[in-house]
Amino acid sequence: MAQQAWRKIRMLVSGIIVGVSVLTTAIDRLASVTLVTGRSMQPSLNPEGGSNCDVVLLNKWSVRNYEVQRGDVVTVMSPKNPQDEIIKRVIGLEGDLIRTLGYKNRLVRVPDGHFWLEGDHHGSSMDSNSYGPVSVGLLQSRASHIIWPPNRLQRIAASLPPNRGPLDDEEEEG
Amino acid sequence: MFRSVLGKTLGFVGYTVTYGCFAHCAFEYIGEFVLCSGPSMEPTIVNHDIVFSERMSPRLCKIQKGDIIIAKSPSNPNINICKRVIGLEGDKVCTSSPSDLLKAHTYVPNGHVWLEGDNLKNSTDSRIYGPIPYALIRGRICLKLWPLHSFGSLSERPT
């Protein structure tokens, strides 16, 4: 009798250990969900502001080799605070020439291994315009879908805001 | 016959996934073995030394000045660098090379660390690319495993 109870406890514990490790790995490697707070990505995310926060699905598998496109919405660890994760749109990749909005230089060439991130709401976003190009190593995931509230269920498309994005090299000379 | 083969295959896949997940958790939350290469940390760590780097201190923000850490290179996320932490956020650090007569100083910004190799003459570190974000740190090196005659914890910075 005691032996049987002991066996059950052992099975339960090993099941919990396996479950936790499989779940942790899936969250770290495949996908997770998160609540978006703040106004920096309006109007794409949190369009109403206030307490109506969007929940987004973060695809981690697609950024395992640090491959992103211009226009993708990504999450990175904040360069200002290692505990914070921030969600922004990729405006420029390495080598691009960016016309900045209020950064110390008017034009910036994005260095190797970095990208240029901006929130969609230029007025109230802490982004590359305040701390410069961000190292790609801080990349955590790509936000692929809005999953809550249900009436806003949709894919997040890669799209650059009008008049943003890398400049052509001819423009630089002109 | 077919059913038993299928069952065995599924069992094998299950075991593989389970142990893969165990390995991921161990490497991600406990620590990993690292083969160091390059001259930048000589004489503390020389080429082809094997060290153990633990992952919990960076997660808990317990990195201190003087620790040797593994971080992602700021200019290429696929490359790891091994350096010593010289300054934490808010610290005043010297940016000039030791042979310069004029000393230049700077303050480490919030959320960043200042890294330098122990081999100051032959190291690409924060003196070239500036302070790096704290979140790029992957682990703290706590034990040297190979070669055996220098097994043990790592020494302080040579002066």
Image: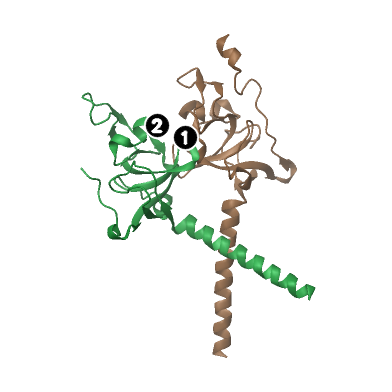
Residue A64, relative to residue B31: is it above or below?
above
Q: Which residue is denoted by mark 1 in the rendering?
A: B75
Q: Quadrant of the N terminus of chain A?
A: bottom right
Residue A72 lies left or right of residue B6; in this view the side is left
Marks 1 and 2 sit apart, C-alpha to C-alpha, by 9 Å
Is A149 or A62 nearer to us in this picture? Answer: A62
Residue at 51% x, 59% y is: B25
**Residue beneath label 2, please?**
B129
Image location (x, y in percent) of residue B36: 39, 49
| Residue B34 image point, x, y percent | 42, 53
Q: Is residue B43 left or right of residue A56?
A: left
Q: What secondary structure is found at the residue carrying circle 2?
A: helix
The residue shown at (75%, 75%) is B4
Q: Position of residue A84 (x, y in %)?
A: 48, 43
Q: Amino acid at mark 1?
A: Ser
Kindly tell me whether residue A53 is visible in this rendering.
Answer: no
Marks 1/2 in contact by CB < 8 Å: the verdict is: yes
Residue at 52% over, 61% down: B23
Q: Amino acid at mark 2?
A: Tyr
Kindly indicate which chain is depicted in brown in the rendered structure.
A
The answer to whether tags 1 and 2 share a subunit is: yes
